[in-house]
Amino acid sequence: MPIETGPSADACADRGPARDAIKEHLVILVREFIATEMRAGATLPPVGKLAERLELPPGRAPVLKDALRFLDASGDIAFHSTQRPRALVLDPMQLHPDDVDLAQEIEQGITSGRFQRGNALPSGLLGRKHGLEADQVRRACRLLIRRNLLAYLPDGPHGPGLYVTAPATTPLPAQAQRAEMSHER
């Protein structure tokens, strides 16, 4: 059953709006393919085989690669490389492998009180420290947002950005706990 693939294959040759429209359409097709025929942890077929499975016309492989790069950047899939690059399907609640260290640092910073509730997350500095671009930092924060540790505020007090929404959860030092308990008596 052929799938409607949008603009003509000739549009793949340029880098303009027509190619962008094709890429957006292919992102949707690949997401549908993942949702109906794949499971988390599975490896997508190589680009040529995936193009065949999606019944794409010849000439779409370069744009399909662009669509897969977009899906990697958004956290739907993760490229991993053994001898040939492959795309691993991620669970919606799974971190991209490249984001684990950053997400752990942010979560530890929140729970320890280093990043305090109501303050902007220094995402640019954290991205530079971990060698990640802004879109990769957003991808790494996606699950922290879902867990209500962070929120994107377009009109935040320090401008648009990610803000800490969860209070610190570090246990009190033993001395402070004893003082708190003596007050309760």
Image (cartoon, rainbow, N blue to C red):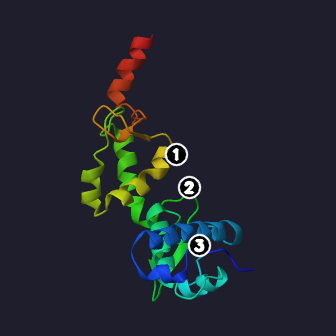
Across and down, in percent, residue 129 comes to 25, 58
Label 3 CA crowd tier, 10 Å (few <14, some 14–19, many 20+): few
> Where is mark 1, residue-wise?
146
Can residue 68 be seen here? yes
Instruction: Give left or right: position of 23 versus 183.
Output: right
Q: Is residue 43 above or below residue 99?
A: below
Image height of 68 relative to 101, above or below: below
In space, the residues marked 2 and 1 are separated at their CA atoms by 9 Å
Q: Residue at x 40, y 61 (%)?
A: 99
Disc 3 marks which residue? 6
Viewer-closest of 180 and 81 = 81
Residue 112 rendering spot, x and y as whole percentages: 35, 39
Tell me the element at label 1: helix
Quarter holding residue 140: bottom left
The amino acid type of the residue labelled 2 equals Met
Q: Residue at x 52, y 87 (%)?
A: 59
Query: Who comes first in sequence, dot 2 or dot 1?
Result: 2
Quarter of the image with the N terminus in it:
bottom right
Report the residue marked by disc 2.
93
Q: In front: 27, or 74?
A: 27
Among numbered discs 2 and 3, the one appearing first in the sequence: 3
Element type where label 3 sits in the image: loop
Q: Residues within 10 Å of mark 2 (few under 14, many from 20)?
A: few
Q: Quadrant of the C terminus?
A: top left
Does the residue at mark 2 contact the one at mark 1 (Cβ under 8 Å)?
Answer: yes
